[in-house]
Amino acid sequence: MDLEKSFKGWIFTIAQNTIYAYYRKLALDIKMQRHLLETFAEFYNQTEDYIFNKERLSLLNEAIEKLPAQRKEIFKLCRIEGKSYQEAAEILSLSPSTVSNQLVSATKYIKRYVFFHAQEFILLCIAAYLKK
C-alpha cells in the first residue's frame, strides 16, 4: 500500500476489481450453462436416434425371421449381402425371375410388417382412438 495515495481510492479500486471479477465469472457461468445445454440437447438427440434405430432394426429382424425360408434367404442374399439377382439365383439354384418375384414379395411383406408393428403406428392408433 502506497501511503502517498488516497485510502478511499484504494478501497474503491478493490471494490471495482471485485465487481469486475464477479461479472466475468458470471458471464463464464452463463456461457458454460449454454454450452452444457447445447451439448446435452445434442447428446439427447443422438441417444434418442440410437434407441429408435435399435427398435427399428429389431423390428426389421423380426419381419425377416417371419418370412418363409426361401424368401428369407433371397432377401438376405440380395438386400443384406448385396448380391445381384443372378448371383443369388446361382447360389440357390433358381431362375433370376424367381429371385426377383420372391424379393418383391419379401420387401412388400417386410414394409407392411414394420409399418403395422412400429411404435409410431401404435401411438397413432391410440391417439386416433382417444380423439373419438
Image (cartoon, rainbow, N blue to C red):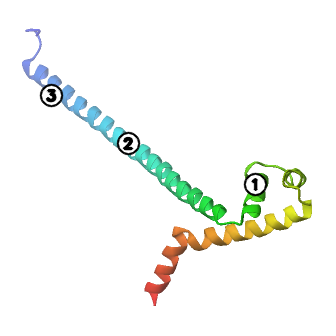
Whole-angstrom CA distance, mark 2 to mark 3, is: 31 Å
- The kind of residue tagged 2 is Leu
Q: Is residue 70 shown above or below 12? A: below
What residue would you read off at disc 1? Answer: 79
* Residue in the picture at 49% in, 54% down: 51
Residue 68 is drawn in which quadrant?
Answer: bottom right
- Taking the image as shown, residue 41 lies to the left or right of residue 64, namely left
Q: Classify 114 as above or below 50.
A: below
The residue under the point 48% across, 54% down is 48
| Left or right of 128 on screen, residue 33 | left
Q: Position of residue 10 (x, y in %)?
A: 12, 19
Mark 1 neighbour density, 10 Å: few (under 14) some (14–19) many (20 or more) = few
> In terms of sequence position, does the residue under pointer 1 or pointer 3 come before the other?
3
In this view of the protein, which residue sits in the foreground, 9 or 88? 88
Residue carrying label 2: 36
Which is more toward the observer, 127 or 85? Answer: 85
Q: Amino acid at mark 1?
A: Arg
Disc number for residue 15: 3
Left or right: 102, with 64 as reference point:
right
Q: Are marks 1 and 3 in contact (CB under 8 Å)?
A: no
Q: Is residue 125 above or below residue 21?
A: below
